[in-house]
Image: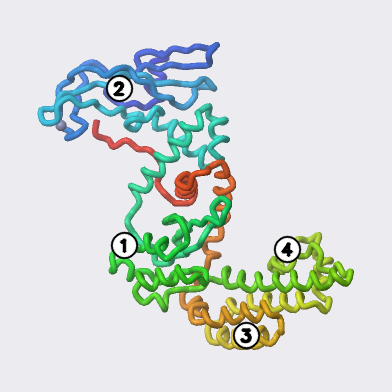
Amino acid sequence: MKDTELYTALLRLGAPWVVREVRLDVAAERVDVRIEEAAGARWCCPECGQTAPLYDHAEERQWRHLDTCECRTYLHARLPRVECREHGVRQVHARWASPGSQFSLKMESRLIDTLKECDVTGATRLTGTSWDEAWGLVEKAVARGLARKERRIPPSLCVDEKAFAKHHRYETVICDAQRGTVEYVVEDRTQESLEAYYRQFTAEELAQVRAVAMDMWDPYVAATRACVPEAEKKIVFDKFHVLRTVSEAVDQVRRQEHKVLRAEGDERLKGTKHLWLANEENVPEWRRAEFEAVKGENLKTSRAWAIKESLRTFWTLDPAPAADYFRRWYFWATHSRLGPVVKAAKTLHTHLANILTYFQHHVTNATAEGLNSKIQMVKEMACGFRNRQHYKTAIYFHCGGLDLYPRVEASA
Ligand SMILES: [Zn+2]
């Protein structure tokens, strides 16, 4: 088999394209493949698909393809230009690359795969592309994915705020709770932030929303009430955020108590912060004994912790016993004489109606928990991005569930 036949077959170019020449430069570890059309090839206008006569050939272009045995491989061609009666002179698209790309389709897809597995800098090292080239592909892939995305509002949504960079700047991230994909990322965590998402849809579409899980955060509540019909029945104050409110109260109790104890030379609470915040089963093995000991002490912090832990049972119950359980828990918490715990319990009580909606919808942020850790990973990878738009693009790329890959429409 001749080298040109080999490459024509491997590249699966299809008629009328054939490989005319293959040049190997062993020292430079480089293969150059020249593609031309077979004699008598017939062309169509890329605009209207009508047959059109050949006009001339554009200047030679080069596309990077998948490596051949570790040799960088480049495809070369002079693309034909046709003269359409209706559209004038138009250049035929290459079948092996998307218009304007400097990579073949196969190479572009490989680069997208690589970029999904590691950060941009890592991908540049693995593939020998520049940062700008690799990032350009991410942006292009996201634009393509968003353009192809089906217009649809998910029936179950999770709304969450994510801190971006320092200085308490936030993004609002809206997820599809069932598919586990990020639907929308928008600046800030105001009412307008969330309304910007809702406003893309018609009233009929918004009526399809069955549940919206969120934090007890007034701007999100207001946005949902303003846009989603019967929002009262659909807003679910999510388990994760409700528990966090109580966990923060436990932490305040610990800090106050630690201060008092330390003044008396008692260091029992030193270095225990994270033990009280973790779910009991998440306390690391090597700290179990220490935690068992301090938990058993007659401390305000251990009482606060017990109140927090007992609330977790609430979500495991059926609706009627759950409401009853909450009443007893609330009595216990508000009679604890632990200021921050009393305050947290009152906050929950104020929001109880929409904490109980959980039992209709069973939607929690935990549905999107895998997604949250992925977003966290993107944030860590994106520490080089000082730019919000880059951060958003990276979230859509990794978490958007988008169809990112290039395809060439089979016309030319
Ligand atoms: Zn035409």
Q: Earlier in the sequence, mark 2 or mark 4?
A: 2
Q: Distance between the Cα atoms at labels 4 and 1?
A: 42 Å
Mark 2 neighbour class, 10 Å CA radius: few under 14, some 14 to 19, many 20 or more: some
Mark 2, residue position: 17
In the image, which disc is placed on residue 330?
A: 3
The answer to whether residue 229 is left or right of residue 361 is left
Q: Earlier in the sequence, mark 1 or mark 3?
A: 1
The answer to whether residue 130 is left or right of residue 201 is right
Nearest the eye: 39 or 210: 210
Q: Is residue 240 visible?
A: yes
Examine the rendered structure and indicate whether residue 102 appears above or below residue 282.
above
Q: Is residue 36 visible?
A: no
Q: Are marks 4 and 3 in contact (CB under 8 Å)?
A: no
Mark 1, residue position: 201
Q: Secondary structure at mark 4?
A: helix
Mark 3 neighbour class, 10 Å CA radius: few under 14, some 14 to 19, many 20 or more: many
Kind of residue indicated by mark 1: Phe
Quarter of the image with the C terminus in it: top left
Ligand 1 resides in the quarter of the picture at top left
Examine the rendered structure and indicate whether residue 12 appears above or below residue 255.
above
Examine the rendered structure and indicate whether residue 15 appears above or below residue 4.
below
Mark 4, residue position: 274
Q: Distance between the Cα atoms at labels 1 and 2?
A: 46 Å
Q: Secondary structure at mark 3?
A: helix
Quarter of the image with the N terminus in it: top left
Q: Are marks 2 and 4 in contact (CB under 8 Å)?
A: no
Residue at horizontal 66%, vertical 78%?
341
